[in-house]
């Protein structure tokens, strides 16, 4: 056997026994690397006579080719083996039940706001927004609550100590009603909007928290009257409580920004000692509303002899409590996971009118 044939046998058997990619790589370096045995033989070709080279050239090149091919084939085999091993160890048995994972819930306030948006969208209302840091004019003056008006004191307002750059008194909005003003001053009537959002008052007990949620409604159009208001609220409350026997009672009331103003009560029945919405055994106040005061329409630059409308406002948290049976408002904002697991909603329970806006 020639030396070259011996060398080839040696290298090929080293390739054969290499059982890891690293071992194979060191065989490759020993043979084909700069200092490798095959490389050394290739270098000798330069010093040979042309006759000698004609004989040795094909032999040495044949050696290089055999080694290169051997390494490539072994490399592929090793990689396949490694992949198969990984696939075997990382296999997941899909027939096993999924492990218990922590699951978040949608807060009832978010859920109710989504329900309200869905119900009112069906009646052609868009959702409007306004800033939580408001100025005096939008929160009070434009809503016909002048500085000396007792209603300002009733609101327990959080004021900012400094005025803004334009000298306006800034405050945390005490209600969502300023969104009425922002909408009327930025959009052409006809207007149909609801405005859900956070409001702030310096007040705290079982039924009051310094931050809570309201929803405002506003319709501005021609020839709007109390009948439209009553139908809208009735349709809304029936959809919201998912009962056709919801009965409303409109009581005369007073709000500076509506004239006439009405407070809306909803009838309830007592079932097994609990109040259930529907029927008329007793009455619960749920909404403030009325026909938009002509001074408010004027303050927004519209002609009250052309445009009329109605507005309403209520607490979202209170609506949630009435529908889903919580009794302490403070728990809404404690962030207690047990409460959220109990009262929260599945993230996939998106309220739709066709699928139901309820639980
Ligand atoms: N803004 C009132 C409040 O916070 C609620 C309200 C009453 C809003 C009557 C209205 C309305 O739009 O017409 O107490």
Image (spheres, rainbow, N blue to C red):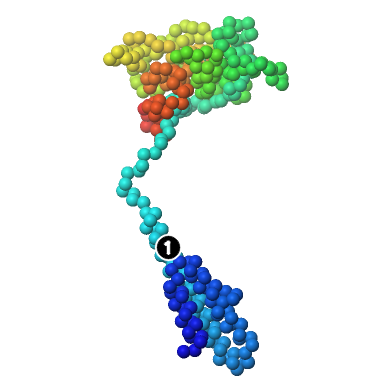
Question: Is 20 in front, or is 248?
Answer: 20
Q: Which image quadrant is residue 122 in?
A: top left
| Residue displayed at 36% across by 51% down | 92
| Residue displayed at 46% across by 81% down | 9
Q: Where 99 sits versus 190, above or below? A: below
From where the camera sits, is residue 352 visible?
no
| Residue displayed at 49% across by 89% down | 2
Horizontally, residue 311 falls left or right of residue 327, namely: right
Horizontally, residue 149 falls left or right of residue 352, namely: right
| Residue displayed at 35% across by 43% down | 98
Residue 145 position in % (x across, y down): 60, 10
Question: Is 51 in front, or is 212?
Answer: 51
Question: What residue would you read off at disc 1?
Answer: 82
Residue 36 position in % (x across, y down): 56, 77
Mark count: 1
Q: Where 78 sits versus 282, above or below? A: below
Residue at the outermost bottom position: 51
The quadrant of the rendering that contains the C terminus is top left
């Amino acid at each position: 056997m020639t030396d070259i044939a011996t060398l080839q046998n040696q290298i090929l058997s080293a390739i054969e026994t290499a059982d890891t990619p690293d071992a194979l790589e060191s065989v490759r370096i020993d043979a084909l690397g700069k200092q490798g045995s095959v490389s050394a033989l290739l270098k000798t070709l330069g010093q040979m006579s042309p006759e000698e080279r004609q004989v040795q050239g094909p032999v040495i090149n044949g050696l290089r080719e055999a080694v290169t091919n051997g390494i490539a084939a072994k490399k592929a085999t090793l990689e396949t083996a490694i992949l198969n091993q990984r696939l075997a160890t990382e296999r997941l048995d899909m027939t096993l039940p999924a492990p218990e994972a922590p699951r978040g819930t949608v807060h009832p306030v978010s859920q109710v706001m989504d329900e309200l948006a869905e119900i009112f969208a069906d009646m052609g209302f868009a959702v409007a927004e306004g800033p939580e840091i408001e100025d005096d004019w939008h929160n009070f003056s434009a809503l016909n609550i002048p500085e000396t008006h007792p209603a300002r004191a009733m609101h327990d307002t959080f004021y900012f100590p400094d005025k803004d750059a334009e000298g306006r008194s800034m405050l945390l909005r005490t209600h969502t009603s300023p969104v009425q003003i922002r909408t009327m001053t930025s959009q052409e009537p006809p207007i149909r909007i609801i405005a859900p959002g956070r409001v702030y008052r310096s007040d705290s007990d079982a039924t009051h928290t310094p931050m809570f949620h309201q929803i405002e409604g506003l319709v501005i159009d021609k020839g709007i009257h109390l009948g439209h208001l009553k139908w809208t609220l009735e349709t809304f409350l029936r959809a919201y409580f998912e009962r056709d026997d919801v009965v409303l009672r409109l009581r005369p009331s007073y709000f500076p920004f509506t004239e006439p103003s009405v407070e809306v009560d909803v009838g309830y029945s007592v079932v097994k000692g609990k109040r259930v919405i529907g029927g008329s055994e007793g009455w619960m106040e749920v909404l403030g509303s009325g026909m938009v005061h002509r001074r408010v329409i004027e303050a927004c630059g519209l002609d009250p002899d052309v445009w009329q409308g109605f507005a309403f406002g209520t607490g979202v948290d209170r609506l949630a409590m009435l529908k889903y049976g919580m009794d302490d408002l403070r728990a809404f904002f404690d962030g207690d996971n047990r409460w959220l697991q109990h009262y929260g909603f599945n993230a996939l329970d998106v309220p739709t009118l066709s699928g139901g806006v309820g639980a």
